[in-house]
Image (cartoon, grey):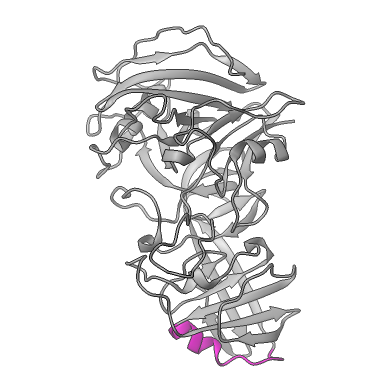
């Protein structure tokens, strides 16, 4: 049963893009004429609070749900919720129950459909990088291969929201670096466990990819997701430092632990053609952060607010159900937000309005996550099952590839 909260009405100003200023130490300074109504904060766990809110957007009223996470509380942590492999999906409530999270929201946009490529299965894999428990799971697809709304200027699929080993949340960018070394030859890798490889590239796939077919990785181009699949492909399996198998077509099925499958398309396939069974091969790979140390957790989406200012080029016309994450207090506070679906509130927010709303709620930096039918926010009491707090657009939870989980030990 949904918790009934006594609503405390708090009228706060809303900042519009172009007039935002960095938030002072005492909280955000905001201006505008749109009102925010905040519900009473309910404690979920030490350092974790939940409340509802409502505001009026340009397309009508919007109602949302907010988790506030105090990372200064030593018992609180944040990590990736995911089904155990990259190419799979599950409902946020099931992911939270399985990991024992006290709260969570859905995460990155993902390869949800493949109408342009008959006979090619959608993988369910997310667009951007992903890090779980300090371990890199995947890198970002090319910008032209992403799913989701148009990104603001200067943003790429490598952008992430992350929490470092220092327990500080931040917006960052994770760039993939990888090399295949065979004798005196070196071949640069251009992807890791991702559903789309750059044209002419070579990607590395591990057991973390899961059983999904790797065929989708050879379809489309760097600028056109719907372009035909490559006709020139090659797979090379490496185990124990040696090539153990070679194939001309992308495979499927779970890759055994300890093995790496190298998949090349176009020129990358021709490069892999130099490798033969028995060759000694070394594969190295990593995600390199731009802003800080190694993240303990990270997932993709795109930034909409940075240092209190909305990013340029945010869509101010299209309203939709949204999910977002925000950072405040120099990375020590995290906000997780999901709006109610259209069955309950038909307005939604534009990306520009979402950035302004996140700043009004207290965030200095904010990050847009997958919305629409994916938008889900859950809480869970110890020993119980996760409760979906918002009203998903389709009337029920959508299975998603990952999310942000909040944990209390």
Pick the residue in front: 14 or 59.
Answer: 59
Task: Residue at 48% x, 24% y: name it.
Answer: 65
Percent across and percent down for residue 341 are: 43, 31
Tell me if 103 is positioned left or right of 345 in this view: right
Give the residues in magenta. Answer: 266-279
Can I make out residue 294 in this image?
A: no
Can I make out residue 87 in this image?
A: yes
Percent across and percent down for residue 384 are: 73, 26
Which image quadrant for residue 361? Answer: top left
Which image quadrant for residue 180? Answer: bottom right
Task: Residue at 53% x, 64% y: name it.
Answer: 194
Task: Residue at 32% x, 31% y: name it.
Answer: 349
Percent across and percent down for residue 239 are: 73, 78
| Residue 404 magenta-highlighted | no
| Residue 271 magenta-highlighted | yes
Pick the residue in front: 310 or 167.
Answer: 310
Tell me if 21 is positioned left or right of 156 in this view: left
């Amino acid at each position: 049963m949904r918790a009934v909260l006594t609503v405390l009405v708090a009228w706060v100003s809303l900042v519009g893009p172009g007039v935002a200023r960095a938030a002072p130490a005492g909280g955000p300074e905001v201006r505008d004429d749109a009102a925010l109504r905040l519900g009473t904060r309910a404690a979920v766990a030490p350092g974790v609070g939940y409340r509802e809110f409502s505001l009026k957007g340009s397309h009508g009223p919007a109602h949302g749900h907010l988790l506030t996470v105090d990372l200064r509380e030593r018992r609180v942590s944040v990590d990736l919720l995911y089904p155990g492999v990259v190419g799979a999906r599950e409902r946020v409530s099931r992911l939270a129950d399985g990991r024992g999270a006290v709260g969570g929201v859905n995460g990155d946009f993902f390869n949800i459909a493949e109408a342009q490529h008959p006979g090619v299965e959608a993988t369910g894999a997310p667009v951007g990088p992903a890090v779980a428990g300090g371990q890199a799971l995947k890198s970002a697809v090319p910008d032209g291969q992403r799913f989701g709304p148009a990104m603001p200027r200067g943003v790429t699929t490598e952008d992430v929201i992350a929490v470092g080993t220092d327990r500080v949340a931040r917006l960052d960018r994770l760039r993939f670096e990888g090399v295949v070394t065979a004798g005196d030859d070196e071949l640069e890798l251009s992807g890791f466990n991702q559903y789309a490889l750059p044209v002419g590239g070579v990607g590395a796939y591990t057991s973390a990819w899961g059983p999904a077919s790797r065929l989708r990785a050879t379809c489309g181009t760097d600028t056109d997701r719907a372009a035909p699949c490559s006709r020139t492909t090659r797979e090379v399996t490496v185990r124990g430092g040696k090539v153990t198998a070679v194939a001309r077509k992308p495979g499927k099925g779970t890759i055994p632990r300890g093995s790496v499958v190298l998949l090349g398309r176009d020129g990358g396939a021709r490069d892999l053609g130099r490798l033969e069974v028995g060759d000694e091969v070394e594969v190295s790979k990593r995600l390199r952060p731009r802003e800080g140390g190694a993240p303990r957790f990270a997932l993709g989406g795109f930034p909409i607010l940075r240092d209190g200012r909305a990013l340029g080029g945010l869509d101010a016309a299209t309203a939709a159900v949204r999910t977002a994450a925000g950072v405040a207090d120099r990375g020590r506070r995290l906000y997780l937000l999901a709006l109610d679906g259209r069955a309950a509130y038909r307005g939604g927010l534009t990306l520009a309005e979402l950035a302004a709303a996140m700043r009004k709620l207290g965030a200095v930096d904010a990050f847009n996550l997958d919305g629409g039918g994916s938008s889900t926010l859950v809480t869970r009491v110890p020993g119980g099952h996760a409760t979906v707090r918002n009203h998903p657009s389709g009337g029920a939870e959508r299975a998603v590839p990952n999310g942000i989980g909040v944990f209390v030990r």
